[in-house]
Image (cartoon, rainbow, N blue to C red):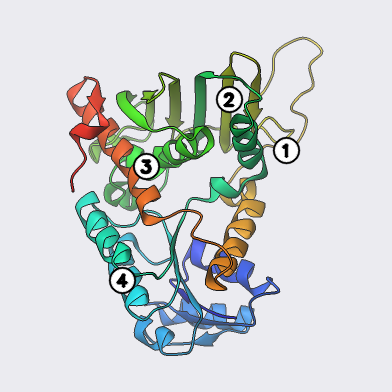
């Protein structure tokens, strides 16, 4: 098949490399507002360069990968859908939830599949955890802990435009909690602080946060996030049930140091970047997209799925600002 890629920044170039190695992908067509980025990708991966998104869609592509700036996501998703071309788009669907709702309505009016990029759904550990929960191996859940700790904060310009740590970072935890447990979040209580980079506080954001989520069956989920984790990129999940407890992310590259006498775990080089931690997941995610394009698989992460994680982020943002519990229904709009 022939796949178009819109946006050749860090993640777009990474996706281009991944797609170029998939057996199902015969050719790539790429476009980026910065012509040098498109030319570099074309030279590296043998892709065809187009001078606009419209030109990519007109180049006979079977699917589109959107890795452009967030503000461009809604228009690019809808252009692909209008052209009848299946689309994969990195999260978020849109800058605001109101825009996201409009995209959802437009997508639901047709039958063109749209897949949103929540890569943890394709990580082997999270897949195994979901299977264990669904098989009843843990019994009824009572506690979930989900962690995302970045080794260093993103640049000031990125933080200022990110929408805040809950919308930019924690949203991955929110999505994977929903996906693994199969439950919905009904209420949140969030706290946050700033003890690191000053520009994060200046942007009205927090660099370290905690959130307690109440799921619709009474399970309690605790989410911990930070922009500052000097030892590396730490993504984990614990699930505790009345019959068993399991964990995702406890491998030798875990960026954590034990001080127990005689304990050598973890013994490997810590994960230091999300592309390192989730290389295999990204490949599985884009392989799944080729199956979506071929019509053999429904979207494994729909626009509606992405918006559900977004509502949780909105509730946490409001909770932090007003120092109170917030029900998710309080922030939801139609």
* Residue 234: image location, x then y, percent: 57, 34
Q: Nearer the viewer, mark 1 or mark 4?
A: 4
Callouts 3 and 4 close, C-beta under 8 Å = no
Of pointers 1 and 2, the one earlier in the residue sequence: 2
Q: Which residue is mark 3?
A: 309
Query: Between marks 1 and 4, how big is the CA–CA gap?
Result: 42 Å
Q: Which residue is mark 2?
A: 238
Q: Is residue 187 above or below residue 115?
A: above
Q: Which residue is mark 4?
A: 78
* Residue 177: image location, x then y, percent: 48, 34
Query: Between marks 3 and 1, how big is the CA–CA gap?
Result: 32 Å
Q: Which residue is mark 1?
A: 269
| Label 3: how many Cα within 10 Å (few below 14, some 14–19, many 20+) | many
Report the side of 229 relative to 195 (left or right). Answer: right
- Residue at image position (51%, 24%) is 145
Q: Is residue 197 above or below residue 104?
A: above
């Amino acid at each position: 098949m022939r796949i178009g890629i819109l946006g050749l920044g860090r993640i777009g170039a990474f996706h281009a490399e991944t797609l170029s190695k998939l057996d199902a992908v015969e050719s790539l067509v790429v476009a980026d507002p910065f012509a040098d980025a498109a030319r570099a990708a074309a030279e590296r991966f043998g892709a065809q360069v187009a001078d606009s998104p419209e030109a990519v869609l007109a180049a006979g592509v079977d699917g589109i990968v959107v890795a452009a700036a967030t503000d461009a996501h809604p228009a690019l998703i809808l252009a692909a859908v209008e052209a009848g071309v299946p689309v994969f788009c990195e999260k978020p669907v849109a800058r605001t939830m109101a825009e996201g709702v409009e995209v959802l309505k437009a997508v639901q009016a047709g039958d063109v599949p749209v897949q949103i990029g929540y890569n943890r759904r394709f990580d082997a550990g999270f897949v195994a955890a979901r299977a264990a929960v669904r098989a009843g191996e843990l019994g009824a859940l009572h506690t979930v802990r989900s962690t995302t700790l970045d080794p260093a904060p993103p640049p000031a310009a990125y933080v200022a435009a990110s929408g805040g740590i809950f919308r930019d970072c924690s949203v991955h935890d929110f999505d994977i909690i929903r996906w693994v447990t199969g439950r919905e979040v009904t209420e949140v209580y969030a706290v946050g602080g700033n003890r690191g980079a000053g520009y994060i506080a200046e942007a009205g954001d927090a660099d370290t946060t905690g959130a307690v989520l109440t799921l619709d069956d009474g399970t309690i989920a605790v989410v911990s996030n930070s922009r500052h984790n000097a030892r590396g990129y730490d993504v984990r999940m614990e699930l505790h049930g009345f019959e068993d407890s399991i964990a995702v992310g406890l491998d030798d590259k875990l960026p954590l140091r034990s001080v127990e006498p005689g304990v050598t775990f973890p013994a490997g080089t810590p994960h230091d970047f999300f592309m390192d931690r989730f290389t295999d997941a990204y490949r599985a995610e884009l392989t799944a997209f080729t199956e979506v394009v071929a019509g053999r698989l429904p979207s494994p992460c729909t626009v509606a799925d992405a918006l559900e994680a977004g509502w949780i982020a909105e509730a946490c943002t409001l909770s932090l600002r007003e120092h109170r519990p917030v029900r998710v229904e309080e922030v939801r709009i139609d």
